[in-house]
Amino acid sequence: MSHSQQTIEPWLRGILRCPQCKGELVDAVHAASEHAGTETAETETAELRCDTCHLAYPVEGGVPVLLVDLARRTDG
């Protein structure tokens, strides 16, 4: 597990649902490329993904940010 991934407490993980559709959230990792001048760096961030409404919510410091406005679309 990379430093950017943080685990969520099991008791909290069991009750979390998507705030938009109330669907089940699954643990996922989002790999993103960051460009700095001529170099490209890959970063991985933990997220909770809803496969029903195709949104991914970031996990920051082990805390899920379940705000629809901050979610990333996963359906292209």
Image: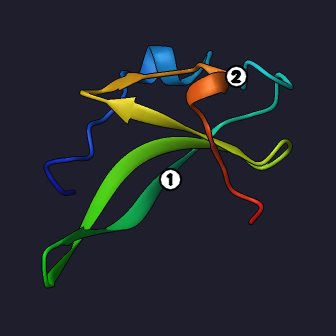
Nearest the eye: 75 or 51: 75
Q: State the CA–CA distance, disc 1 to disc 2.
A: 14 Å
Is 61 positioned to the left or the right of 25 in the image?
A: left
Tell me the crowding category of disc 2: few under 14, some 14 to 19, or many 20 or more residues within 10 angstroms, Cα based.
some
Secondary structure of the residue carrying numbered label 2: loop
Pick out the residue farthest to the bottom.
38
Instruction: Provide the residue designation for mark 1.
Output: 28
Q: Which quadrant of the structure image shows residue 71?
A: top right
The residue at 13%/84% (across/down) is: 38
Q: Which residue is mark 2?
A: 17
x, y percent for residue 45: 34, 50
Marks 1 and 2 in Cβ contact (< 8 Å): no
Task: Say left or right for 53 vs 68.
Answer: right
SS at badge 1:
strand
Quadrant of the rendered structure where residue 57 is?
Answer: top right
Q: At 13% across and 49% down in the image, what residue appears?
A: 3
